[in-house]
Image (cartoon, helix red, strand yellow):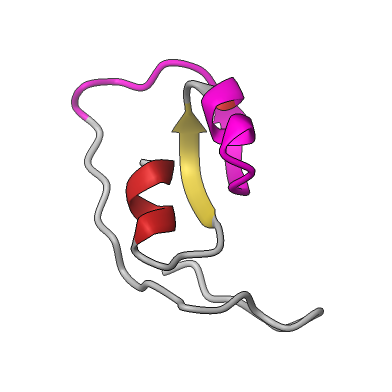
Amino acid sequence: MSNRAKRSGAVGTIVDGRVRDLQEHRGLEYPVFAREVGTTSPYEVVQVSEVRKQAPSLNERICIC
């Protein structure tokens, strides 16, 4: 997930759920924010809603839709 997002120009990822392989994300120096860390169910579906080319400004509101 992080490799593909980073190559696409993303500067970080916010996940409304759990992520796994936390050390790999950290090793890429790519910020991933999630509710929990652990293995995910194979039945969960993730849909990309937006890709930003630059990081939001400090204190800028972000929408998690």
Q: Please state if 1 lies on the left or on the right of 22 as rendered.
A: left
Rendering coords of residue 32 (x, y %): 58, 45
- The image shows residue 5, relative to residue 37, as above or below, that is below
- The image shows residue 62, relative to residue 22, as above or below, that is below
- The image shows residue 36, relative to residue 15, as above or below, that is above
- Which quadrant does the N terminus fall into? top left
- Looking at this view, is 55 or 9 the one in front? 9
- Report the label total: 0
For residue 25, which quarter of the picture? top right
* Farthest-out residue, right: 59
Residue at 41% x, 69% y: name it.
Answer: 65
Rendering coords of residue 4 (x, y %): 32, 49
Residue at 47% x, 38% y: name it.
Answer: 17
Q: Please state if 34 lies on the left or on the right of 3 as rendered.
A: right
For residue 55, which quarter of the picture? bottom right
Residue 41 painted magenta: yes
Rendering coords of residue 44 (x, y %): 25, 33
- Looking at this view, is 18 or 57 the one in front? 57
Residue at 24% x, 55% y: name it.
Answer: 47
- Looking at this view, is 57 or 39 the one in front? 57
Rendering coords of residue 50 (x, y %): 35, 73
Residue 26 painted magenta: yes
- The image shows residue 41, relative to residue 50, as above or below, that is above
* Farthest-out residue, top: 39
| Residue range of the region highlighted in magenta in the rendering | 23-43
